[in-house]
Amino acid sequence: MQPLQGELASFCSWSTSGMQIDGKGKGVGSATWENYEYAIKVYLGYLVRFEKVAVPSLKLFTDPHSYVKYISFLDKKETSIVTIKNHISLAKKVVSWLACDASRAESLVFADVQQWYDALRVQLIQKIPRKRKDPGVLEEEGAWLPAEDVLALFEDLRLKALHMCKADELNPVQARALHDACLANCMLGYLPPIRLACLRSLQLPNEGIPCLDKDCKSSQCKGNRLAVKQAALWISLPHHKNQDKWDNAIIEVALPHQLDELLHEYLVRGHSMVAPGQPYVFANRKGLPFGDASSLTAYWHDLMKRLGCPAKFPPNRLRHIFVDERGGKDRAEGPTDKGAAQLMGNSVKQWSQSYDLKFHRREAAEAMEAMAPWREAMLKKAKGKQPAVPESEGQPSDGDLVIDLAESGDDEEDLGDQSVGDEVSEYESCDDSNVDLTGSACAFP
Ligand SMILES: [Zn+2]
């Protein structure tokens, strides 16, 4: 085993352990670990490539000279301060791990390095202004669509898919179109923008398949899945961002009729062609599950391009688009702010972290029901703008809707001035391709 691989294995074991004698807080999940590993390799890859370091090792995190060069590199690439803070938090974590087996003399050095990282973080927060997400700028850059345009696009997909389903048999292209219509309409419209990790991990309503979540500790758990109950399709999400905070409360609700209808067609007629033998609802063009956030983002970009979408944005931007509409002065009828805040946990992160850590079933359900008039209002607004949008099929059902209240982290959200040590978990929220870990520039050899 190469030295670095050994170090990574040991650091992984330490980071993911639920019983960190030397560390702070709980162990991280496998998705977070993957993000850690990636970020570490980007840093070491930078040193190998640009600083001619011969032997990459985690010990390089104790070298302020190397690290400050790397941070300067990130800064030149206009990496956001949020991402840079994440890098620093991870660096501190690596040093904490190194300190576990350090000699007394080394421990003193490592303690100095930790202090240096804290100071660096404070300096960088002052130096690099936080870039506010501005829909106007994003729209100019072709990275934004107003909510009504997004919904019109998704509605178009849905209606075309349903039209195709009138045929006796679907061909693979039609099955794929049905898949895409389901994916888009699960992302926003009937539901608030649910967390992509929940969509990626959504399993088929097949009771025989156990939970496939790598970090699941319950043998009874059925995993994030669609479920058939009382002849209706439900979504059930035991694994979500606030799983721990909400004492393992399962987010579980019936889907509105139109979405149920669309998904039913896909599950019965499309899935076997799109993803034969796969236990997950959604799949890439090879029929394989979306293993990570970037694979779904790439698929999404391709889909939007094929649809002739005038903008290019990662699927996670739907969350910003939704919040932007709700915050607008001429917002449509829809969920209340408090309800939307529940649904979009990240928007009121400190609020939710400080004193509101529970899953509020009633408020969440009310907000979800209000998604129906909101969706109608968006489609009406879009119709006014784009006469080409096909006729809607009437009012959506007022049935119970699904909530993903799981999101508590978002890459663009700042945690403010809370202690650095608690912040490493921010890597958990790498669903957004906006997180620039600079990998393209310095891939680890
Ligand atoms: Zn599970």
Image: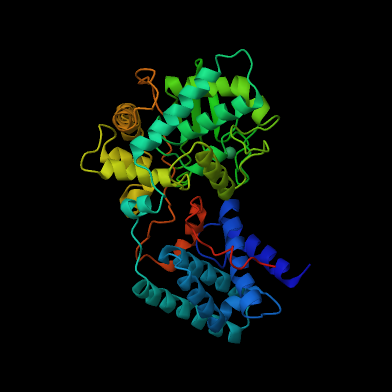
Of 331 and 429, nearer the camera is 331
Place of residue 442 in the rendered image (x, y in percent of width and height, measured from the top left): 61, 68
Q: Position of residue 120 (x, y in %)?
A: 43, 77
Q: Position of residue 82 (x, y in %)?
A: 42, 63
Position of residue 145 relative to residue 232, above or below, is below
**Is residue 189 shown to the viewer in this render?**
no
Residue drawn at x 63%, y 73% is 58
Up/down of 48 relative to 16, above or below: below
Q: Is residue 285 visible?
A: yes
Q: Which of 204 and 177 lies nearest the eye of the viewer?
A: 177
Q: Quadrant of the C terminus?
A: bottom right
From the viewer's perspective, tell me whether residue 81 is left or right of residue 21: left
Q: Is residue 137 above or below residue 253?
A: below
Q: Is residue 371 left or right of residue 435?
A: left
Answer left or right for 350 relative to 94: left
Front residue of 428/444: it is: 444
Q: Is residue 114 above or below residue 141?
A: below
| The residue positioned farthest toward the front in the image shown | 388
The quadrant of the rendering that contains the N terminus is bottom right
Q: Write down which quadrant ligand 1 falls in.
A: top right
